[in-house]
Amino acid sequence: MRSSNHASALVVCALALAMACTSVTQNSPRDARVADCQLVHSGGPYGENLFWGTGRDFTLTDAVCRHYKQVVW
């Protein structure tokens, strides 16, 4: 969240962690359809930005920064 807040501080207010959301994400399958690139949303009550990539090992920062436009939008 620090990376996202640092980048978004130029245009919007900081994000905050909602503890209710953490239990939802911890109970979601982490490998949902990775093999065929068809990632599936959990269908839960909150929005999700799913990230998957090939060709190298991606970091959490990669996932956050590559989806920055989704967070701001």
Image (cartoon, grey):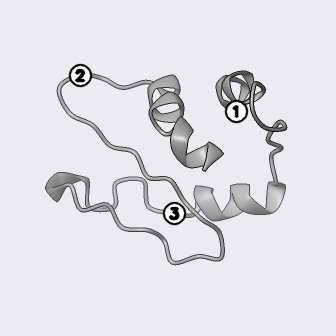
Is the residue marked by circle 3 packed among few (<14), some (14-19), or many (20+) residues within 10 Å? few
Disc 1 residue type? Met
Disc 2 residue type? Arg
Q: In this figure, which residue is indicated by the disc labeled 3?
A: 28
| Res 66 label | none
Q: In this figure, which residue is indicated by the disc labeled 2?
A: 56
Q: Which of the 4 image quadrants contains residue 6?
A: top right
Look at the numbered discs 3 and 1 and tell me whether their residues touch, using CB distance below 8 Å: no
User: Where residue 13 sits: x, y (%)?
Assistant: 84, 38
Question: Relative to residue 61, is residue 24 drawn left or right?
Answer: right
User: Where residue 46 sits: x, y (%)?
Assistant: 65, 69
Question: Relative to residue 47, is residue 19 drawn left or right?
Answer: right
As measured in the structure, the alpha-carbon distance from the residue carrying label 3 to the one carrying label 1 is 19 Å
Q: Secondary structure at mark 2?
A: loop
Q: In this figure, which residue is indicated by the disc labeled 1?
A: 1
As measured in the structure, the alpha-carbon distance from the residue carrying label 2 to the one carrying label 1 is 22 Å
